[in-house]
Amino acid sequence: MKSEFDICIIGAGMAGATIAAYLAPRGIKIALIDQCFKEKKRIVGELLQPGAVLSLAQMGLGQLLDGFDAQPVEGYALLKDKEQCTIPYPAGYNGMGLHNGRFLQQIRASALAHTSVTQIHGKALKLLENNRNEIIGLSYRDAATSQVRPLYAPLTITSDGFFSNFRAHLSNNHKTVTSYFIGLILNHCTMPFPRHGHVFLSGPTPFICYPISNNEVRLLIDFPGEQLPKRALLQQHLDTNVTPFIPEPMLDSYQKALHEGRFKVMPNHYMPAKPIIRKGAVMLGDALNMRHPLTGGGLTAVFSDIQILSGHLLAMSDFNDTDLIHKKIEAYYRDRQSANTNLNILANALYAVMSNDLLKTAVFNYLQCGGTNAQESIAILAGLNRNHFSLLKQFCFLALFGAWNLVQSNVLNLPKAVRLLSDAFTIIKPLTQNELSQMSIAFPYWGRLKTFTDFSYVKTQNKS
Ligand SMILES: Cc1cc2nc3c(=O)[nH]c(=O)nc-3n(C[C@H](O)[C@H](O)[C@H](O)COP(=O)(O)OP(=O)(O)OC[C@H]3O[C@@H](n4cnc5c(N)ncnc54)[C@H](O)[C@@H]3O)c2cc1C
């Protein structure tokens, strides 16, 4: 069917709006549909790792970080009991702390400024199929008239976020909740290390903070478990596991924010990507793949996926060739898997490590030593080093370092050292299996991965 659009995008969130902003100036006709185009106040997507900043720059969208008080972030600070250390990002790279809602409005405005993008205000209801089970568009309820209308395009991108209604048709994903994040904004707060992301390791589970404007700091407090915390439990968690470990200069603004009840709670999902490749539709963003937000890797993955998918789509000369689109979708799923493996494994592995006393101490001491191991680790976290071997090497080094330190300080610690190694193995094994099982999609390219060296991903992107 001849359609008015090349692509329908469901969801003008971080993924949908960004791919629209990138493809629109290249002459692709896009219908961008969302149920709400107003600025959102969310606690998600506020720390862009350098890998995400770099992807934006490579797409020519770097200017979208200007003009709304986004703050450069130069590296990480770790704080544990009375000790603290900092690890800078690799030289020449910065992260950004920002208000997600403001950033998204800039991206949306940039996309909608192009005449090739049609804004559709409504709720997508259903994917439309032809009699060969191919997806040919969608139906939506128009926000102004409440009428249900169809939209047709040779490709539909479903980027409707973590509560996606469409992933059931396009994937075999299994979604779990690892924990919850309680988000507070601390006004006029002095962090121990300005222009740094902070990870606080003194309590039983971690909490993190980073600047989101020149006078606001986002504090995200982990609440472990699959159940939404009840208010009394939440208060108890804050009183026992958080408040005693808030640094003195932050205490005033922290208590003010708590007193005013200015906090939001969000679930942290884990969902490996398990796409079903169907003609006419492709998934992008949290609809496809989620990891724990402790490492702030979500948008690095989203932007990198956009680059990969767009690279394949832009290589087509004819947008009505549905067989060719199908091949491009396959290529995208194959390529994205290897590009995101480190981000996905690291996020959930680090969360588990930081909730385990022995491993948490090991990670702090390991990174405190600085040197090439700390540099390689931060480059992986930053989304700049996507080499799988680097990740597994650093994880093994960390576990061995922790076990050796225990035994060296007292040989009677041997059982603890064995437990540390066993815990490390138990953490990394299922995460690696989940990612590598998907790697079979990329099997023909497996050999290519072996040639990856540090920063090779970044170099490849720069060349292209
Ligand atoms: C607590 C928390 C903190 C996080 N912090 C970070 C961080 O610091 N750094 C980072 O990189 N990542 C972070 N992430 C992850 C990151 O926010 C997500 O990966 C990213 O927002 C995903 O973008 P998306 O476009 O897939 O989803 P969204 O940005 O949620 O967009 C989905 C869009 O789809 C629309 N929509 C949904 N259903 C429909 C429908 N039926 N019809 C029309 N429109 C629809 C919604 O209105 C929305 O606009 C965090 C995640 C969590 C949970």
Image: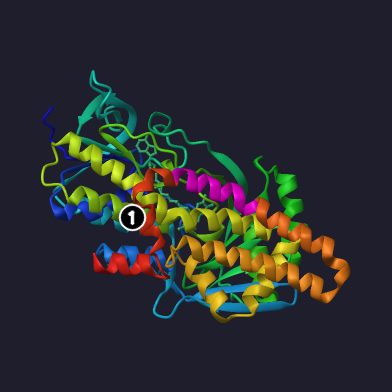
Count of numbered circles on the image: 1
Identity of the residue furthest to the front in this view = 447
Locate the C terminus and report the quarter of the image it occupies. Answer: bottom left
Quarter-of-image position of residue 244: bottom right
Q: Which residue is mark 1?
A: 105
Decide whether residue 206 is among the magenta residues. no
Q: Residue at x 53, y 38 (%)?
A: 175
Judged from the image, the secondary structure of the residue bearing numbered disc 1 is helix
Coordinates of residue 68 in the picture (x, y in percent): 36, 67
**The one of 310 and 62 positioned closer to us in this rendering:** 310
Quarter-of-image position of residue 84: bottom right
The colour scheme applied to this rendered structure is rainbow
Label 1: few (<14), some (14–19) or many (≥20) C-alpha neighbours in 10 Å: many
Coordinates of residue 317 in the picture (x, y in percent): 11, 46
Which stretch appears magenta? 427-438
Decide whether residue 428 is among the magenta residues. yes
Q: Residue at x 50, y 60 (%)?
A: 296
Q: Is residue 229 visible?
A: yes
Amino acid carrying label 1: it is Gln
**The one of 119 and 335 positioned closer to us in this rendering:** 335
Question: Relative to 44, is 147 on the left or the right?
Answer: left
